[in-house]
Amino acid sequence: MDTQAAQLRSSRAGASGLGATGGVLPFLALLAVGAALPLFVGGYWGLIATRACIYWVLVSGLNLVVGFAGQIAIGWVALLALGAYTASVLTAGTAVPELSPYLALVIAAAVGAVFGLIVGLPALRLRTFYFAITTLGFATIVNQVALAWQSVTGGGVGVAGPIFPDPFSSKWGFYYFCFGLAAICTWMTANIAASRFGRALTAIRDAEVAAEACGIAKPALLTAVFLFSGAVAGIAGALFASLQSYITPDAFPLDLSILFFIAVLIGGRGSILGPLLGTILLTALPEFAAPLVAWSTFLYAVLLLVIVLAIPGGIAEILDFKNRRPLESHRAIVPQPDLLPGLIGTPTDGGALTLEQVALSFGGVQAIDGLDLEIRPGQVHGLIGPNGSGKTTTLNVISGYYLQQRGAVRLNGTVLRALARNRRAHMRIARTFQTPRIVGSASVLQNVMIGGTIDGKGTFVESLLSLPRHHRDEVMLHDTATLALAAVGLERLGGVRADRLQHSELRFIEIARALMLRPAYLLLDEPAAGLSAEEIKRLGALLVAIAQAGTGVLVVEHHPDLIFDICHHVTVLNLGKKLAAGTPTEIRSHPEVVNAYLGG
Amino acid sequence: MIQSIVLSGVAIGSIYALIGITYNVMFSASRVFSFTAGTLGMIGGVLGSLFIARMGMPVAAGLLLALVGGAVLGIVTEIVAVRPVLRSLDQHLYVLSTLALALMVQQFVAIEWGTDARPFPRLLPTARTDFDQQFWLPMLACIVVIVGLELLYRYTLVGRAFLAIAEDNFAARALGLPERGLRIASFALAGAIGTLAGFAGGELLLAFFGNAPMLTFYGFIPVALGGMGNNRGAVVAGLLLGLFQQTANFLIGGIFASVAVFTVFILVLLMRPEGLAGVTAQRRV
């Protein structure tokens, strides 16, 4: 076993953050072109390039919010304005003693971070349209305050922007300053994109329920992202004010916000290169034809509509050549159960996961009515019954999605806190879903790595700066995920986009993801649904092996053959009540079960 | 003083309530919130000013044409920005597609009509009084729409079909209701209501392209606080919002009044995301 495992721990793919998002080459090319720009073009294009760099500093952070976390933040120009006014007012010396522009830049970043958090935090409670509207409202209000607070902002007359001293005072000097910051932002966000935090963000975006089941704490993660995104927006604001040399509230129209937002979407969600190209494209576009300037926002809107309706993947999808290669058409899933002990580790001793007199009703429907259940480590427990008998509801009570009205769920005697979904993962309770919940645009391996998010040791900042602990986490998650994929028999598909796989393969991805938790208990919701007879057999063997490695397995299923084949203990539900419980042999001949469910 | 606060508060509140109803009528038919709600209000003001002040049409003809224009915009919204993304409602692409359409209309108006606020004609040839037409016209429009919708929903077959679609789309389709036709009709109706809001409130808000995002935001507050799809809630919350805003305007000044409105809105929403009158639904897993 160990040799096999060692073989699988092959060299790591995509060692750098940039590499993981579509190859490092395009970034190096952009870096070279950007660095050599003064050799090719004149001062006017230098100005446009400076503006593109500044916009990208902001968009790089917004990309994490919109492209990765999937939060529809359309009012980000407000943070640009806040950063710009902070830096300008601090260096103008009118309202407060004059500060150095560099110090003002840092303070603008801090102000941006604080307000990024304030604008962003409603996202924890409000969804989609609601959140979009609150950011829109915030943008409107910042502009109005800038106009009205004349003693500080100069009102409609405005205030002079900061001037950075030599060597950054010349046009090209300032360009290199902005270019350098833009490059750093690219590097940092690419590091996040390739870290467990980036994967967790996409999980929140595409499969929030699964993210919770993997133990991902949305509040902490989004807080970090909003702080970062706000800080770079504040920096962008300070640079913008310096570039404009004089700012009024008119310098921050909502159109600009739309440009930032659309740059991310045109680029493609979950990509770094795409939004970077999108930002350059949108900044340069109106320059190619003078009549376009007035119509630029109109054209952005048209572009947005076209992108949403025709190419939701954006530029990144167009550039994703790797995933156009056809997949092998006859693929067999061949699990390797002998890898499991190395993955799951030492069996837990004693204890059990128990339900005591649990009852839950939805309106007038009694979904579960006084259910007792005991799941023991090392055993497979089957939960069967007709549709609507309360099987999935039971699973949802255990994993904290539903709150039971009576009774308790205990782990080794301790009552599990109700509705604390992401705490279940820390107690090593893993689960799969009736409809597989995966991140379609991420690779299979990345999807499995999401399952191990809580085992990372490094912080968000360490990943941002690509420090050693971040690398150790990534190596560990990559190796464990490779092993888990091999254990369920999908190791050859690790690099493929998950949404290109067949339904049955998605089920095994979910199991691999759950195994990343080294689960003490594994709850499976109809894992055999949609599988072929051969695949069901292999699934059965895999589940038995998982139990042998020490995990307590609970299977909700409709395939009696599978249940009777692999279970140590079977509970039959009917209308929320326990109809029968016992060994498969007892259940198979239980008259009431045969009557109600199996058929005679 | 109190009299003028109440008058302008109720008048502005009526406009917000009408935009809220516009959101609701579209939402009931499609489960989609559309960014075009405020745009419709803006269009009402602009079309009214265009037809009556610039082209010299009679008021009745101007109103009729403006309403038709709004209904057409509603239908365009349904065809361009809503229907294509209905299949994947869970991806919330409608937020982006309706935003794109709203921006297109807004920018078009900004370029063709201009970015300055232009005056809206006085609709009735009466002298200015304390209880002026600029205040009571929005209130009247609000009452007409509420009563009209109530009659429609209660006493007509089409109205009941609207309710059926709003209650359970799948069941309504299974019963053989022409879901697509009803959806288009709802969007046309919403378009007319939104335009009427901007038209009746034209003297207060003027014919200004910037009203679109403003109404989109303030018109959504009644929906969020009154509960999605709940027209009565929208009217109550809209009037309260108008009164609160005008009081804050008077007490602490215009700009900081909008900060106050925004803060209160966010706080209330954070405490009760389902609205003041709503109930929480457990998520399906």
Image (cartoon, coloured by chain):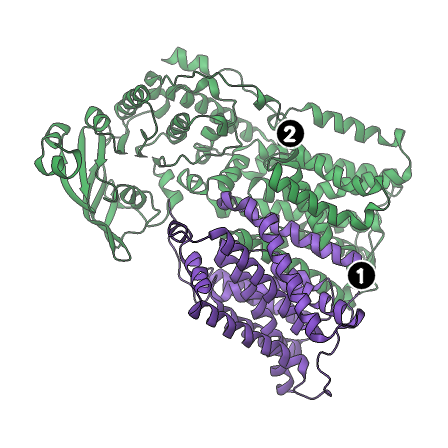
Give residue B198's position: percent from left, percent from top.
Answer: 66, 69
* Residue picked out by circle 1: B114
The answer to which of A127 and A290 lies nearer the viewer is: A290
The chain letter under disc 1 is: B
Left/right of residue A386 with respect to residue A86 in the rendered view: left
The three-letter amino acid code for the residue at tag 2 is Ile
Give residue A117's position: percent from left, percent from top.
Answer: 59, 52
What SS does tag 2 mark? helix
Q: Where the C terminus of chain A falls, by quadrant?
A: top left
Give residue A161's position: percent from left, percent from top.
Answer: 82, 53
Give residue B78's position: percent from left, percent from top.
Answer: 58, 52
Q: In the rendered picture, chain B carries what hue? A: purple
Residue found at x 34% / y 31%: A519
Q: In the rendered picture, chain A carries what hue? A: green
Residue found at x 75% / y 58%: B109
Question: Hey, which residue is sitting farthest top in the picture?
Answer: A3
Labelled disc at residue A318 = 2
The answer to which of A274 and A590 lies nearer the viewer is: A590
Quarter holding residue A285? top right
Q: Where the N terminus of chain A falls, by quadrant?
A: top left
Q: How far apart are marks 1 and 2 (CA)?
A: 38 Å
Closer to the eye: label 1 or 2: 1
The crowd level at tag 2 (other Cα within 10 Å; few <14, some 14-19, many 20+) is: few
The three-letter amino acid code for the residue at tag 1 is Gly
Instruction: Let me know if marks 1 and 2 both belong to one chain.
Output: no
Labelled disc at residue A78 = none
